Amino acid sequence: GEPISAGLLAGGALILVAVLLTTLRRRRSGPQPSVQQVGPAPGAKALFMGLRDSTRRNIKRAQRAGVTVTVSSMPAGLREFCRMNWLTRREHGLPPQPACFFDTFQRHVLARGRGMVVLASYNGRTIAGSVYVHYGKKAVYKYGASDRRYQHLRANNLIMWEAIQRYSADAYASLDLGRTEPENDGLLQFKRG
């Protein structure tokens, strides 16, 4: 895994920022898991038409169901993401990052305009969220979490669509969707749009 939490436990807020920004630049040699990137496109309609049919259907399904999306860089938005992250990590048998990790992330990344939290809600309840970081004209999808009970609403597709539109509208050169192990078919399919 990433050495982020180790750096935070050692009290190194600068390590957190360095690791996050390094994520934006790092590429290792040799065989690697798949890395998906989304580049700029000439408008929302062209972006939308570039997605797979099933992805477009999933976005529309979420919209028709009444899933709403909000974007935040405020502590309250990150706290809601942390709640979702706790559920997701528990589902996967992993411990969540400590609260001090996200407190530091808020102070050194979000509060400085270097990231955003995108949350999806249904009937007033947050059901999914993603965290993105950006530097210069590069953006990275860093974390995603969701309440499994609401997966049928396809909120994650709507969240990703919101991020893609925002970064494209702001003329970002790329949105890196991160590394994915080849055997993780579901996540690969999601990232391939």
Image: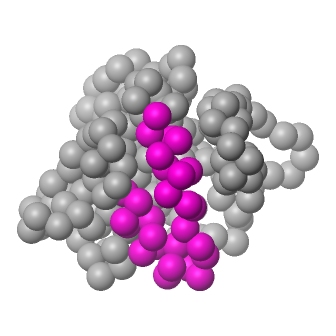
Residue at (34, 55) in percent of width and height:
79
- Is 58 above or below relative to 18? below
Instruction: Report which quarter residue 46 is drawn in.
Output: top left
Q: Is residue 103 magenta?
A: yes
The one of 64 and 23 positioned closer to us in this rendering = 23
Pinpoint residue 95: horizontal percent, then vertical percent.
Answer: 59, 73
- Is 161 above or below relative to 191? above
Q: Is residue 171 magenta?
A: no
Look at the image and tell me in which quarter the N terminus lies.
bottom right
Residue at (21, 46) in percent of width and height:
70
Magenta span dominant secondary structure: helix
- Report the side of 9 relative to 115 (left or right): right
How many marks do you count on the picture? Answer: 0
- Is 45 above or below relative to 122? above
The one of 27 and 36 positioned closer to us in this rendering = 27
Residue at (69, 72) in percent of width and height:
183
Is residue 94 visible to the viewer in this orientation of the structure? yes
The one of 27 and 109 positioned closer to us in this rendering = 109
Segment colored magenta? 81-107
Instruction: Report which quarter residue 117 is drawn in.
Output: top left
Q: Residue extending furthest front? A: 11
- Report the side of 139 relative to 183 (left or right): left
Pinpoint residue 153: horizontal percent, then vertical percent.
Answer: 23, 71
- Report the side of 179 relative to 177 (left or right): right
Pinpoint residue 27: horizontal percent, then vertical percent.
Answer: 78, 36
Residue at (59, 82) in percent of width and height:
93
- Report the side of 171 relative to 10 (left or right): left
- Is 128 above or below relative to 135? below
